[in-house]
Image: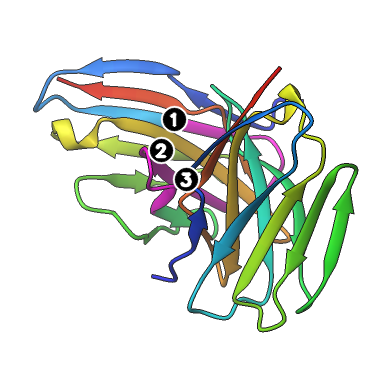
Amino acid sequence: TQLLEQSPQFLSIQEGENLTVYCNSSSVFSSLQWYRQEPGEGPVLLVTVVTGGEVKKLKRLTFQFGDARKDSSLHITAAQPGDTGLYLCAGPTGNQFYFGTGTSLTVIP
Amino acid sequence: NAGVTQTPKFRVLKTGQSMTLLCAQDMNHEYMYWYRQDPGMGLRLIHYSVGEGTTAKGEVPDGYNVSRLKKQNFLLGLESAAPSQTSVYFCASSYSRVAFFGQGTRLTVV
């Protein structure tokens, strides 16, 4: 099993604050993905990063893939209540997807 | 767009009972998966399939069986439910290394 550890596990912040979520592994991945899951729904893909050191931006969300391709981070600028949800990193490997432990984010208006 | 549909959405079982969870996808994807989601443990793979008629074990297969008789359907069976199988179950299909999930089935075993 290729473990993906996320930190923090829980995060509660005020609207307008910035935050960073981390995804770490001892294994090298050819790519890493970030999914967001809202209550009562399944996860939905946000982004895939494929090159070591790559940075991708999706509006207020910035995703980075570590140089060694063992870790990734998600930074949210000026968080909004609509960002509330469970954020999961995932490493597609062969025929499978290994998911991280998840970060539950609550943005308080 | 239906995507991935799971039935039922909620179920309560007594210990020892059996049940089948149905997953249907209309995207013609070859790969399908069953995951369970428990607090603090993310998504753990139970079984998966790389095509019609094929199945393989994932990380936590014990106590579950699966079948993929048709490309669009992937069934997850519990032969004798145990309280440890209380969880939220997600089905997914994938194409080009992107996973598409259903809305989940919340199962409680009492």
Q: Is residue B108 left or right of residue A101?
A: left
Classify 10 Å Cα crowding around label 2: few (below 14), some (14-19), many (20 and above): some
**SS type, badge 2:** strand
Q: Are marks 3 and 2 in contact (CB under 8 Å)?
A: no
Q: Are marks 2 and 1 in contact (CB under 8 Å)?
A: yes
Q: Nearer the viewer, residue A57 or A42?
A: A57
* Chain for disc number 1: B
| Whether residue A59 can be seen here | yes
Quadrant position of residue A38:
top right
Quadrant position of residue B96:
bottom right
Disc 2 versus disc 1: distance between alpha carbons?
A: 5 Å
Disc 3 versus disc 1: distance between alpha carbons?
A: 31 Å
Q: Nearer the viewer, residue B36 or B71?
A: B36
Instruction: Name the spot of residue A97 as percent of width and height, x first.
Output: 54, 60
Instruction: Name the spot of residue B14 as percent of width and height, x first.
Output: 13, 19
Q: Are marks 3 and 2 on the same chain?
A: no
Q: Mark 2 or mark 1, which has the lower sequence index? A: 1
Which residue is denoted by mark 3 in the rendering? A9
Quadrant the N terminus of chain B occupies = top right
Residue at x-position 25% and y-position 30% = B86
Which amino acid, by three-letter code, is at mark 2? Leu
Instruction: Name the spot of residue B8 as percent of width and height, x first.
Output: 43, 19
Which amino acid, by three-letter code, is at mark 1? Leu
Magenta region, residue range: B22-46
Which residue is denoted by mark 1 in the rendering? B22
View extreme (bottom): residue: A68
